[in-house]
């Protein structure tokens, strides 16, 4: 193999390693959704409120059904 081909192969491998590390960082470490939220003016308060309301509804439904905070064997 000529040195020119070896250089192209080496550049190809380095580029692929760089892209793999960059994509891992963006999708697993930074959570790309957090980056996109910075560029959009989403109303996070409305989402958080609906989540809190859903939790409260779930607790109220569990109380109506007679659920209690105990172990799986029914002890309190």
Image (spheres, rainbow, N blue to C red):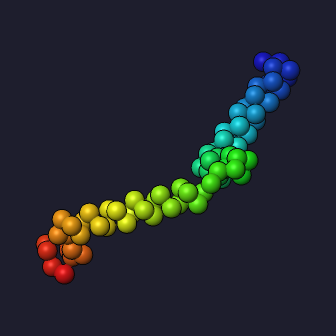
Foreground: 3 or 56? 56
In the image, 23: left or right of 60?
right
Q: Does 14 appear above or below 4?
A: below
**Residue 61, horizontal then vertical, whole percent:** 26, 63
Foreground: 51 or 6? 51
**Residue 28, horizontal then vertical, whole percent:** 59, 49
> Is residue 25 shown to the viewer in this render?
no
Answer with the quarter of the image where residue 3 lies: top right
Residue at point 64%, 46% (across, down): 32
Q: Does 36 appear above or below 6?
A: below
> Number of callouts in the render?
0
Residue at point 17%, 69% (across, down): 66
Residue at point 15%, 79% (across, down): 75
Q: Residue furthest right?
A: 4
**Residue 60, horizontal then vertical, whole percent:** 29, 67
Residue at point 40%, 59% (across, down): 54
> Is residue 36 shown to the viewer in this render?
yes
**Residue 35, horizontal then vertical, whole percent:** 69, 49
Q: Quadrant of the N terminus?
A: top right
Q: Quadrant of the C terminus?
A: bottom left
In the image, 15: left or right of 52?
right
Foreground: 28 or 54? 54
Q: Does 61 appear above or below 26?
A: below
Q: Does 19 appear above or below 73?
A: above
Q: Residue furthest bottom?
A: 76
């Amino acid at each position: 193999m000529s040195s020119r081909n070896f250089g192209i192969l080496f550049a190809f491998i380095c580029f692929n390693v760089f892209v793999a590390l960059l994509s891992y960082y963006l999708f697993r470490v930074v959570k790309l959704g957090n980056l996109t939220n910075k560029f959009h003016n989403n109303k996070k308060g409305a989402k958080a409120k609906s989540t809190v309301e859903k939790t409260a509804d779930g607790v109220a439904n569990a109380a109506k059904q007679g659920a209690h905070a105990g172990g799986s064997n029914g002890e309190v």
